[in-house]
Image: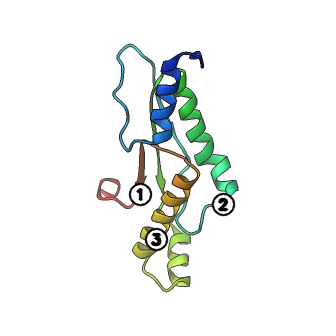
Amino acid sequence: MSDPFDPRFFTRVSVRIIGTQHPQPRSSGVRNVLITSALPYVNNVPHLGNMIGSTLSASVFALYCEVAGYNVLSICGTDEYGTATEAKALAEQLTPRQICDKYHRLHRNIYDWFDIRFDHFGRTTTEKHTE
């Protein structure tokens, strides 16, 4: 693991905390680590139990791996398919797409507020996923 007194330690940490939308350039000869989190459903507001059990722990592990010097790519996104999404849309008198848009934004905002970061935060309803 990196020495916390080495100035490069803080450079790596600050890159993660600032939270770029794109992964940092990868170094050759360094182990690659792909970190994924369970995809949260868009049928409700995420609560601490959801975050602690999946998104927060994935974000913390990604930070640890970056500080340790690994090439890290962390991804997550919202799972927008299923009966729960349709039921929530009916309950809120919205279309399933409107529910997905609303709760994807809400999840993203909450994760940003808690400084839970991913290199990519996607959606299962994108064209790429539905091909």
Residue annotated with mark 3: 102
Residue under pointer 2: 47
Q: Is residue 81 visible?
A: no
Q: What is the spatial separation of the Cα atoms under label 2 and label 1, in whole angstroms?
A: 21 Å
**Residue found at x 40% / y 41%:** 20
- Farthest bottom residue in view: 93
Could you say which quadrant of the image residue 26 lies in?
A: top left
Closer mark to the observer between disc 1 and disc 3: 3
Where does residue 2 sit, x and y in percent of width and height? Answer: 56, 17
Instruction: Sort mark 2 into few (<14), some (14-19) or many (20+) by Cα contacts within 10 Å.
Output: few
Q: Which residue corresponds to the image point at 54% horizontal and 15% vertical from the top-left?
A: 6
CB under 8 Å between discs 2 and 3: no
Please name which of the two marks, 2 or 1, marks the residue nearer to the observer.
2
Quarter where residue 84 is shown: bottom right
Residue corresponding to mark 1: 124
Residue 95 x, y percent position in the rendering = 42, 80
Tell me whether circle 1 and circle 3 mark residues in contact (CB < 8 Å): no
